Amino acid sequence: MAFLGVSIGLMVLMVAMAIMNGFDKEFQRKLFTMNYPITVMPLGVSSVNQGDLELLKENFPELRFSPYIFSQVMLKKGQKFEGGIIFGVDFEYEKEVNSIVAEALSGNEKLNEFDILAGRGIKEELFLDKGDKITVVFMQGEPGGLALIPKTKRFVYREEFTSGLINYDKAYMFTPILSLAKVLNYDEGVYDGIHIYSKEPMRDIKNLQSILPDHLRAVGWWQQNGNFFSALELEKRALFIVLMLIILVASLNIMSSLLMTVMNRRQEIALLLSLGAKPSEIKKSFFGLGMVIGCSGVVSGILLGTIILFVLGSFDIVSLPADVYGSSKLPLDLSLADFGLIIIGALAIVALSSWYPAKKATEVDILNTLRNE
């Protein structure tokens, strides 16, 4: 029973940590794309201009840049309203920094003036077909009579994109930057920010910040979503501790069985000690017995966990709603660090469970045991 308990506990821990890591990596990949590795934004009421963009291109030719402007909007079609964010971008540049947009426009699709690329969630909520016109209501107002009237403009829905995360698919839209600049009255060469693609964003953000003017700052995708990933990391640690308790409970069976063996073998232990056996030899015998039980359970658990992970990764046994989890396939990724912690933690628990009964075996009272038993 102790052997089975350790095996099952370690197997469950491996599978659970692989699933947690898989979801963590999947969310990181999705957020990495839709939030962009690095974003240069202005401080206060200042803006980004063409000179700032040229400065970055000159100093970092290996990076890819996509200037943008954006606005929060309301979408209206018929009697249905939906909120969202519209980005004005140069699609030739945007394709280099956003793989989702590049995939959506991978064919011969080309967005003309006041055409729109919208997320699948927006398309489904408003029942859009290609060529449909959408009324976009902007938050900025324009004078009209005695009050400010929100700006409105009709855009034409042309294409859809799917990021795998419903929050972005139901909110994000893209249109040519010149179209949005006309609506918002932006001067040529003035932007709200610059999206940057970098393979090493945590390194490049420091270099970028060192040359940026005082009115600009660089923000990484991990900084924009810090609370989310902190919550995931805390959840993973809590799950690791809770599931490690399964192995601890199974190891108690090793301790109890060894203690019962010590109690039943008191005469033999006392006789061996009286014949000259060293206490360390007695301790090694019982400690070795406990480690054989525990380590065989660990090895068996590793084999079972590996088999289950292989089956789950190779066959679509578990299907997930893609709009909730970002993927319909169960993501699995057991890192070497987590695997090492699992093995070390399991062996430490097994060793402690074996050490205590072995220590009690060396404390047998030789004279009283031989005289009375």
Image: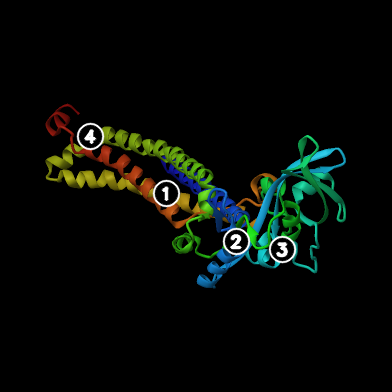
Residue at image mark 1 = 342
Q: Is residue 62 above or below residue 186?
A: below
- Numbered label attached to residue 266: 4
Q: Circle 2 is placed at which residue position?
A: 49
Q: CA separation, marks 4 and 3? A: 74 Å
Q: Quickly name the residue at label 3.
A: 103
Image point (28%, 33%), residue name: 264
Q: Amino acid at mark 1?
A: Ile
Q: Are marks 3 and 2 in contact (CB under 8 Å)?
A: no
Distance from label 2 to label 4 (Cα)? 86 Å
Whole-Å distance between the Cαs marked 2 and 1? Answer: 52 Å
> Which of the two residues, 219 or 145, is positioned nearer the viewer here?
145
Residue 207 coordinates in the image, percent (x, y): 45, 64
**What residue is rendered at 61% in x and 52% in y?**
312
Other-residue count near label 1 (Cα within 10 Å), few / some / many at <14 / 14–19 / ≥20: many
| Element under disc 3 | helix
Quarter of the image where the N terminus is located: top left
Marks 3 and 2, the one that precedes in the sequence: 2
State left or right for residue 67 relative to residue 131.
left
Sequence order check: which comes first, mark 1 or mark 3? 3
Q: Earlier in the sequence, mark 2 or mark 1?
A: 2
Q: Would residue 172 be visible to someone looking at this image?
A: yes
| Amino acid type of the residue that numbered disc 3 sits on in the rendered structure | Glu
The amino acid type found where label 4 is placed reads: Arg
The residue mark sitting in front, 1 or 3, is 3
Dots 2, 4 in contact, CB < 8 A? no
Give the quarter of the image for residue 252.
Answer: top left
